[in-house]
């Protein structure tokens, strides 16, 4: 029984009912829609900044009401600056929101929180983009306030969907399922881009209207269709299933060494699955083994990952002089690499039943690929290949920490029985990560302005090394337990 | 052909008033003040009077030459002691011929004639330049006491100004050496950025029915079997 998951793989697929498929698709698309509305905002930036500013002609054009009646900003540069500020504001409020919504999600019904988050955030986006335009009411402070609220509401999405997925998909095969599933952000980006570009000709307000309406519809569907856990329809929970599996009551993240940290107040109400489960507190969630190291590691890694998302098209058009639309298209390869990387590394970690060593190896290779990418020649296909490789080694681990590992952490042995920790833990990990990402956006622009692109890559390498540093205690522990298991296996034969 | 002899202006005014009664109160209210801001009537033998006589269906009213709809086609403001054409002047933007000679006008008329797209003949005092400079006119003729600017040129057609309007804008003349950028065919809205109109009804219909059917389907297959005790 050295590789139990391999033997179970055949039965794994047959274990999945149509409920599993529906849950997978519903959570996948609900997060895709949330991401799509974010992408819409970045895709209509040009139109919005045109709408907010008078015409840039040196001569006043007549009729004035058509060409220069809007004076929210004197020129497009300042409007772009403000839109960048809105991005930063959003990221910070999103990060703060993640901590809160995780806690809320564990205490209230995940379905209600997710559905409420999607519908209300859709309404805010609708007011932000459509109502203000219909009323011709442009106000900086209103925009800022709406975007802060939107960040808070959008943050309900991730902890809830990861928690629901964690409830349905046990740790056997979790790596590969979550790896595939974390393509939802990229699919959302594509969806948002398509929706926005198809209606942008009618005016940017319709881009917002369409994405907001679709997101609202998604929220309604979630409310009527989502089963947050197998227990809801009387199916056995995954803990119950896992308890039958030999060797697998040992959580993936924490080795047997953690048992000395065992505190009885974490694991209560054993064997009473029907009784009301109590959610753990924020402080307790932080104290769970692995939560803080992974949070800090994810802060560094998400910084690099998001910098790639936000700055890659700009870097490409700036450094190689490629057209912006082409650079946008090319940067999809980073996503592709990330999805493949996440799935493949998830699969390997499932087989090994240990995630940290896989992460560490991938991140070491990521440093190499960053060096390689920074020296990419001015050739689109080579650049795309290097980009995909970088995405494989950076996006992959990043996806894994934010989904599969978060689910592992929130479902570990110490809190079995009081399992309502998933959303809180996911919120903590992703919230810390988002703070890192928000700070990173600022730092990247600062470094790039003062020192140039090469130093941005050195900064990425530094941050990737920090990621390895933060998870190094876990790597050592997990490799030790792997060795022990191997020895025990040999001894038993 | 309206009669235009000496001693007849009062008759003509009353005739015009009767006509306006026929045309209704709205038009009577819209009777342009610019025609009566300066006392007297169109000078005999002036260019405006000549034009009004030659063209059928036109009549003189105070200082204006109007067509039957009450639109100003000619305006004779000569010898009115005008330093500037005054606030009511834009009412005459439909005019084909305007006479401003023998007035102490200041020489900055460029924006005064915004919207005067029909203007073909403009008579100015000798010392005042044609609005939009001589390039805006086909011919400029100098007389002892006046100057005639004849034939407006279309600025939009001039070859050196192909890129005169921003994206989706289309140039239309707006008076001597003036132009407007209106939205090109099919475009509308601020900066002419919008094209076509979004079918809100169809969109909400499709989205609403899709949402409804998926919701019912999922409720039926997924949530119907939930235990009431667990749905907290």
Image (spheres, coloured by chain):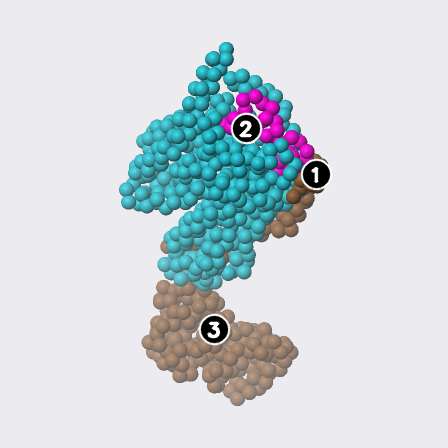
Chain colours: A cyan, B brown
Alpha carbon distance from label 1 to label 3? 77 Å
Q: In the rendered structure, does residue A454 fall within the stretch colored magenta?
A: no
Residue receiving disc 1: B227
Q: Are marks 3 and 2 on the same chain?
A: no
Residue B143: x %, y % from top left: 35, 76
Mark 3 crowdedness (10 Å alpha carbons): few <14, some 14-19, many ≥20: some
Magenta region: which residues? A226-252
Residue receiving disc 3: B90
Of discs 3 and 2, which sits in the foreground? 2
Q: Which residue occupies the foreground of this view, B76 or A382?
A: A382
Q: Quadrant of the C terminus of chain B?
A: top right
Task: Find the residue positioned furthest to the top.
Answer: A493
Residue receiving disc 2: A171
The subunit letter for the residue under badge 2 reads A
Determine whether label 3 and label 2 are within 8 Å by CB: no
Q: Image check: B165 left or right of B9? A: left
Residue at screen point 43% across, 35% down: A294
Residue at screen point 33% across, 35% down: A462
Of discs 1 and 3, which sits in the foreground? 1
Q: Image check: B162 left or right of A270? A: left
């Amino acid at each position: 029984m050295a590789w139990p998951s391999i033997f179970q793989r055949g039965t794994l697929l047959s274990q999945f009912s149509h409920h599993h498929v529906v849950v997978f698709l519903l959570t996948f698309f609900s997060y895709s829609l949330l991401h799509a509305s974010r992408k819409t905002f970045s895709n209509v930036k040009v139109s919005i900044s045109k709408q907010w500013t008078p015409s840039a002609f040196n001569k006043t054009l007549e009729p004035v009401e058509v060409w220069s009646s809007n004076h929210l900003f004197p020129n497009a540069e300042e409007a772009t600056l403000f839109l960048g500020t809105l991005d930063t504001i959003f990221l910070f409020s999103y990060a703060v929101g993640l901590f809160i919504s995780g806690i809320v999600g564990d205490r209230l019904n995940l379905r209600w929180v997710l559905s409420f988050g999607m519908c209300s955030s859709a309404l805010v986006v609708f007011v932000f983009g459509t109502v203000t335009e219909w009323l011709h009411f442009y106000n900086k402070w209103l925009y800022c306030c709406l975007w802060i609220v939107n960040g808070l509401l959008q943050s309900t999405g991730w902890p809830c969907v990861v928690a629901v997925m964690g409830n349905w998909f046990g740790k056997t095969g979790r790596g590969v399922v979550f790896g595939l599933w974390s393509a939802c952000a990229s699919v959302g980006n594509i969806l948002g881009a398509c929706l926005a570009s198809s209606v942008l000709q009618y005016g940017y307000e319709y881009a917002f209207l369409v994405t907001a309406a679709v997101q609202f519809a998604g929220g309604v569907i979630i409310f009527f269709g989502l089963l947050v856990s197998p227990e809801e329809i009387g199916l056995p929970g995954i803990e119950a299933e896992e308890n039958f599996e030999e060797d697998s009551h040992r959580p993936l993240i924490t080795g047997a060494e953690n048992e000395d940290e065992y505190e009885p107040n974490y694991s209560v109400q054993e064997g009473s699955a029907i009784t009301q489960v109590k959610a753990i507190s924020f402080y307790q969630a932080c104290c769970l083994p692995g939560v803080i190291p992974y949070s800090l590691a994810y802060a560094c890694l998400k910084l690099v990952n998001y910098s790639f998302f936000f700055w890659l098209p700009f870097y490409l058009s700036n450094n190689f002089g490629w057209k912006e639309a082409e650079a946008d298209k090319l940067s999809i390869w980073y996503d592709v690499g990330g999805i493949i990387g996440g799935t493949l590394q998830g699969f390997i970690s499932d087989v090994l039943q240990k995630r940290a060593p896989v992460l560490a190896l991938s991140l070491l290779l990521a440093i190499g690929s960053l060096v390689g990418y920074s020296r990419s020649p001015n050739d689109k296909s080579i650049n795309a290949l290097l980009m995909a490789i970088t995405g494989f080694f950076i996006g992959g681990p990043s996806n894994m920490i934010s989904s599969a590992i978060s689910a592992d952490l929130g479902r570990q042995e110490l809190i079995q029985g009081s399992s309502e920790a998933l959303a809180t833990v996911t919120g903590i990990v992703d919230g810390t990560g988002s703070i890192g990402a928000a700070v990173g956006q600022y730092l990247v622009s600062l470094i790039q302005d003062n020192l140039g692109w090469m130093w941005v890559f050195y900064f990425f390498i530094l941050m990737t090394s920090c990621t390895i540093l933060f998870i190094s205690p876990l790597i050592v522990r997990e490799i030790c337990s792997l060795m022990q298991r191997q020895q025990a296996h040999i001894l038993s034969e | 052909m309206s009669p235009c002899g000496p001693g007849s202006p009062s008759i003509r005014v009353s005739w015009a008033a009767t006509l306006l009664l026929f045309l209704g109160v709205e038009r009577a209210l819209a009777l342009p003040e610019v025609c009566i801001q300066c006392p007297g009537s169109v000078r005999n033998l002036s260019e405006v009077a000549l034009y009004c006589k030659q063209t059928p269906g036109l009549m003189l009213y105070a200082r204006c030459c109007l067509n039957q709809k009450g639109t100003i086609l000619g305006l004779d403001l000569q010898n009115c002691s005008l330093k500037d054409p005054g606030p009511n002047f834009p009412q005459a933007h439909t005019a084909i011929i305007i006479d401003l000679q023998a007035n102490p006008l200041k020489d900055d008329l460029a924006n005064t004639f915004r919207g005067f797209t029909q203007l073909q003949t403009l008579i100015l005092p000798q010392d005042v330049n044609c609005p939009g400079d001589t390039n805006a006119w086909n011919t400029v003729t100098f007389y002892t006491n006046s100057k005639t600017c004849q034939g407006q040129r279309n600025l939009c057609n001039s070859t050196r100004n192909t890129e005169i309007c921003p994206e989706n804008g289309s140039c239309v003349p707006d008076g001597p050496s003036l132009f407007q950028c209106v939205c090109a065919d099919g475009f509308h809205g601020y900066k002419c950025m919008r094209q076509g109109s979004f079918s809100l009804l169809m969109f909400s219909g499709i989205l609403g029915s899709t949402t409804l059917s998926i919701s019912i389907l999922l409720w039926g297959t997924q949530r119907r079997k939930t235990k009431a005790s667990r749905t907290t």
